[in-house]
Image (spheres, helix red, strand yellow):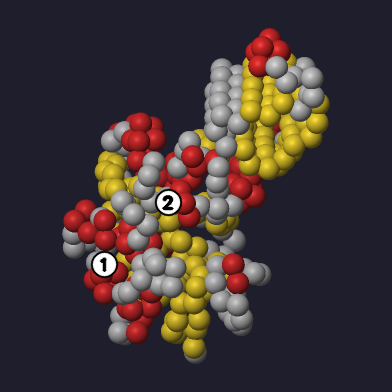
Amino acid sequence: MKGVLLCGDIISDSRLKPIIYSVSRSMIPIANVPFIEYLIKQMVECGIDNIAIVVGEGKQDFELYFKNGKDFGCRIRYYRQHKNTGLAGQLLCIKHFVDDDNFFVAQGNVFIDFKMEQYLKQFKKEKCDGLLLTKEIEKPWKHDIAIFEKGKLIEIIKKPKITNSKTALTGIYIFTPAILRAASKIRPSKRGEYEITDAIQYLIDREYKISTMDMDDGTWIDASRDSDLLECNKYVLSKIDGKSKIDEDSKIENSIIGDYTSVGKRCSIKNAVISNCIIMNDCIIDGVEMKDCIIGEYSTIIGNGCISGIMGPKTKIYLTPSLTDEKEKDEYI
């Protein structure tokens, strides 16, 4: 079975500004590993080793890291989404890659820890045109929701304000090529995108067999916001000794690196107290208390104070009032 990863970020629409000015959302490091690598690893482990990645404005960072996929046990090809056409529009980018085969699909903002083999087996057992991986949740208004009638899937509702169903679509699917025909037939939504939920609904309305499978106890995180990425980072780091990960090329002096913090390459951290943070490559941090932060590459944060939140690439923050002269700043660094 072939695999497709939908990573066509459009910067103007992202809720992860300003961090994605330097890196695609799906390439943001989780425990110092690109977000999407966790999905690729799970796909390869269950035999999906022919993979297409649909990319948007950040195609280069995918290719520089994954190349042709050989080092990751698979073959990877890249397809460009030139404008924001939505997830169904991204599917149409890989029409020739899929050909007449069934294929696995994952949205590029999905983090899961789940035995994928049983999902593939269920698809073969169901003999359906689409198998949607779902999860029971407490806040259905934040997600795309599956509606059932007498046990049969009858409707997909996108972020409903009111619903009795708590069955959310996780962004993981297996389809036959029928979904591509559906994607080519639907109209743009009110926000101007071709929605994958509308393509699925197109098939449901025409009596195609679309089934669901619940993840049960599997872990699913819809990583659309900075807090979601920090939750992913925490989840991965909680499974390793020390509950933090510091690249060997980084230098830590007189600092406390608390739980659930990852530090990228070539960072310099002095006199700092840091917890629950993602610090990307080539950052300089001195004298600061940081909590619940994502810090973009080549950022400099110096001085006495506390900060939290998301900082874009090449951010410069000087919390010490006296450091107003550029020469003084250079000497301090």
Give the mark nearer the N terminus: 2 vs 1. Answer: 2
Q: CA distance from mark 2 to mark 1?
A: 22 Å
> Residue 187 at x, y = what percent?
32, 74
Q: Quadrant of residue 201?
A: bottom left
Tell me if residue 246 can be seen.
no
Tell me if residue 285 can be seen.
yes
Picture layout, residue 188 above or below residue 30: below
Type of the residue with mark 1 = Leu
Which residue is found at the position 46% from the left and 45% from the top?
26
What numbered label is drawn on residue 231?
A: none
Q: Residues within 10 Å of mark 1 (few under 14, many from 20)?
A: many
Viewer-nearest of labels 2 and 1?
2
**Tag 2 residue:** 10
Left or right: residue 322 versus residue 135 is right
Type of the residue with mark 2 = Ile
> Residue 78 at x, y = what percent?
28, 44
**Tag 1 residue:** 180
Left or right: residue 78 versus residue 132 is left
> Residue 286 at x, y = what percent?
73, 21
Q: Residues within 10 Å of mark 2 (few under 14, many from 20)?
A: many
Picture layout, residue 134 above or below residue 276: below
Which residue is found at the position 38% from the left and 32% from the top?
65
> Residue 92 at x, y = what percent?
27, 61
Which quadrant: the N terminus?
bottom left
Which quadrant: the C terminus?
top right
Left or right: residue 216 versus residue 26 is right
Which residue is found at the position 68% from the left and 29% from the top?
317
